[in-house]
Structures are given as C-alpha cells and as structure tokens.
Amino acid sequence: MPRESVKAKKERAKLIWQELKLLYPDARTELNHETPFELLVSTILSAQATDKSVNAATPELFARYPDAPSMAQASPEELEPYIRTIGLYKNKAKNLVATARQLLKEHDGEVPNDFNTMLKLPGVGRKTANVVLSNAFGRPAIAVDTHVGRLAKRLRFSAHENPDKVEGDLEKLFPKNQWVFLHHALILHGRRVCFARKPNCVSCTLSPYCPSSRV
Ligand code: SF4
C-alpha cells in the first residue's frame, strides 16, 4: 500500500469518527460510578480485568468504603475480601489503600483534577489518569488500553506498540473535542466487532476505511 499522506489520513479519520458516532452515539465508560473517587477506584481495579467483574464487586466495596477518608482507615487485608474476584487483587488492595491515604494527606480527600498530580498516586498510570480526567472532569484525553491500541494499529492510525506514543498519534489525527468519545467508541468496537483474534470484518461498517479489512 502506498504511503498515506497526513491529509488523507485525517480525512479517513474523519469518516471513521462519523461512522463510530452512528454506531455508538452514547459511548461512555462502562465502569459504574457516582463520584470521581469511585471512578478512580474502579479504574485501578480494572487493570487486566473486565469491567463486568469490577462492576460486580464495587457495590459492596463502595457501600463499606464510599470515599477516601473511609478507605484510608482500612488495611489492604480488610479490602481484599471485597475484591478477591478481580485479578491481582492483593496488589490492587495495597494500591487502593495507599492512594486513599495520599488523597487524604495531600488533597483533602478529593481526587485531583490534574494529570501530573494523578500520576503520583499509587497504581495510577497514564491510562487510569486519562480515564478519570475525561469521565469525571470532562477533560479532553485519550486513554490507550488494549482495545484502543489494537484498533489504532489496524486502522493504521499508529504503528507504535507503546501506549504513550499511540496516544500522541491519535491526538494529532483527531480534534480535542473528539478525544473522549473516540476513546470509548474504539473500546466498544474492539469489544463487539474488531476482536483481538478474529476481527469480524464482514460485519464491520468501518471496513471501507480500514486498511486491515479482510473483506
Ligand atoms: S474492518 Fe476488520 S480490522 Fe478493520 S476495524 Fe473493522 S473489524 Fe477491525
């Protein structure tokens, strides 16, 4: 395939975005939450776990520990029974308690609305910070998880494996006001159509604009 110009790629990105809007008009996070703190906790728990498994565990967890002050008083061992159905729960319990204590000590128990400050919280990387900032505070951000990374590659929006670089490539192709929707729509498309092993290209309406289409 001849090298695609930046202009052509941006035009293709626009068509794909329009198609994603038709497919997933209400795309948003599937992690249940009511506060920025709950979203932060759910996002930390969702690393290498399904949203479904996280949503099954969080109602009881949030009933017992609804905010940073209450979670900061717990020990990791006290949290474990609430999240033991989720992968890596021992490590996540440690990070949650440490994060709650840091929030209490440095931020009056509130989740900071700032990317670099969030990165200093235990268990919080770029992806988690972007998910929380975009969903809880409406900040433009693209969180690159496994689905977004795979779709970006198949759609030839990025040739990189490194999520930070994929994030940068996507940010250059799409206007800021499209970032949050794009992130959620790509996740949904990865879950429902563009599967990791066998992408369902025959049913995919992005196929005419996708260089990896097998149709
Ligand atoms: S055409 Fe195939 S590879 Fe391209 S986005 Fe659709 S399912 Fe994925």
Image (spheres, grey):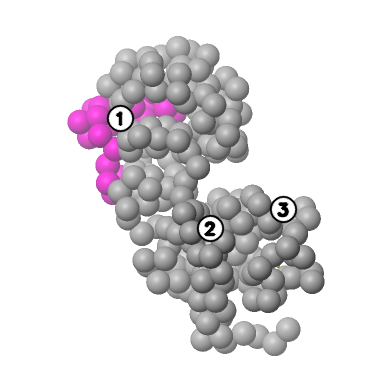
Tag 1 and tag 3, C-beta contact below 8 Å: no
Give the mark, 1 or 3, whose residue is nearer the N terminus: 1
Front one among 182 and 166: 182
Q: Which residue is drawn at 32% across and 53% down?
A: 138
Residue nearest the observer in this picture, 170 or 192? 192
Sequence-earlier tag: 2 or 3 = 2
Q: Residue 24 carries which label?
A: 2
The spot of residue 44 in percent (x, y) is: 47, 35
Crowd band around label 1 with a 10 angstrom C-alpha radius: few (<14), some (14–19), many (20+): many
Q: Please say if 42 is above or below 78.
A: below
39 vs 155: above or below? above
* Left or right: 112 as drawn, with respect to 142: left
Contact (Cβ within 8 Å) of mark 2 with mark 3: no
Q: Residue 29 in the image: state x and y as whole percent.
A: 47, 46
Relative to 22, say whether 10 is above or below: below
In the displayed structure, 64 sits above or below 28; it is above
Residues at circles 1 and 2 in contact by the CB criterion of under 8 Å: no
Q: Nearer the viewer, mark 2 or mark 3?
A: 2
Amino acid type at circle 3 is Ala
The quadrant where residue 203 appears: bottom right
Q: Mark 1 falls on what kind of element?
A: helix
Q: Can residue 11 be seen in this view?
A: yes
Disc with the residue nearer the chain's start (1 vs 2): 2
Q: What element carries label 3?
A: loop
Label 3 belongs to which residue? 196
Q: Which of marks 1 and 2 is in front?
A: 2
Q: Is the magenta stretch mostly helix, strand or loop?
A: helix
Quadrant of image for the N terminus = bottom right
Residues in magenta, as a range: 94-117
Residue at the (34%, 45%) spot, across then down? 136
